[in-house]
């Protein structure tokens, strides 16, 4: 290999590395940008419906000032799970830009039970992974909880329940037509 060929090979390799860094950086920048509450509520469907409901919950305002944002609950932190969720979100873009099937409060309310069941199913399948980013049975001091809560959490551990089994409606109003006995452990639902 001549010195000119070596320089050419080195130049191509260097350009490839630089382009790779730029593309990977751009990808991560876009990923981070779409993982903000500002991005989530940039669509009026999200701002005027779920986000408005979130503002009336313990996850928005509480005594400790710890606040959950949309991505905290709806986007996994682990990279592979996050990418899978982002791919699934492309379906939501279709419904926003093309189908426009939740673009009014009335349309959103009409689909709310169906949408909620989809989210609850996904949370159940992941053992409420996003809830566990902040809430963990191992970190709970049952002596500091109200006795009813401590009893329910101990029951959940014993029976293998996951957060969403008992806490539907904790961050958004339960949809009209929701039957708490339909899928709640023990036939009872705890909304908070």
Image (cartoon, rainbow, N blue to C red):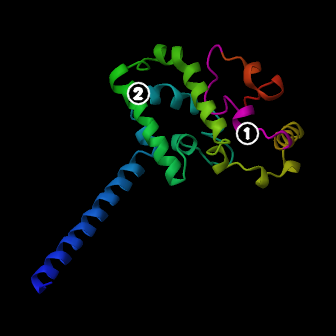
Residue visible at 68% across and 42% down in the picture: 127
Point 58% across, 44% down: residue: 68
Vertical relation: 60 (above or below) 94: below
Q: Which mark is residue 101?
A: none
Q: Earlier in the sequence, mark 1 or mark 2?
A: 2
- Is residue 51 found left or right of 44 in the rendered image? right
| Secondary structure of the residue carrying numbered label 1 | loop
Q: Nearer the viewer, residue 2 or 153?
A: 2
Residue 42, horizontal then vertical, whole percent? 39, 35
Residue drawn at 75 percent across, 32 percent down: 166
Quarter of the figure with the C terminus: top right
Residue nearer the viewer, 19 or 168: 19
Which quadrant holds the N terminus?
bottom left
- Residue 92 percent coordinates (x, y): 43, 30
| Left or right of residue 8: residue 178 | right
Q: Choose top left, top right, bottom left or bottom right for residue 11.
A: bottom left
């Amino acid at each position: 290999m001549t010195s000119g060929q070596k320089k050419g090979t080195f130049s191509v390799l260097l350009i490839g590395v630089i382009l790779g860094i730029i593309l990977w950086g751009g990808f991560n920048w876009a990923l981070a940008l779409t993982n903000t509450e500002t991005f989530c509520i940039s669509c009026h469907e999200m701002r005027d419906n779920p986000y408005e409901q979130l503002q009336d919950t313990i996850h928005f305002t509480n005594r400790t000032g710890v606040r959950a944002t949309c991505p905290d609950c709806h986007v996994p932190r682990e990279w592979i799970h996050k990418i899978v969720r982002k791919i699934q979100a492309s379906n939501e873009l279709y419904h926003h830009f093309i189908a426009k099937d939740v673009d009014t409060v009335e349309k959103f309310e009409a689909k709310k039970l169906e949408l909620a069941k989809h989210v609850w199913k996904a949370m159940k399948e992941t053992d409420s992974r996003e809830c566990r980013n902040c809430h963990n049975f191992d970190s709970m001091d049952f002596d500091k909880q109200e006795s009813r809560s401590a009893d329910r959490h101990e029951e959940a551990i014993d029976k293998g329940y996951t957060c969403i089994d008992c806490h539907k409606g904790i961050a958004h109003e339960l949809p009209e037509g929701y039957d708490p006995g339909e899928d709640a452990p023990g036939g009872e639902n705890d909304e908070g």
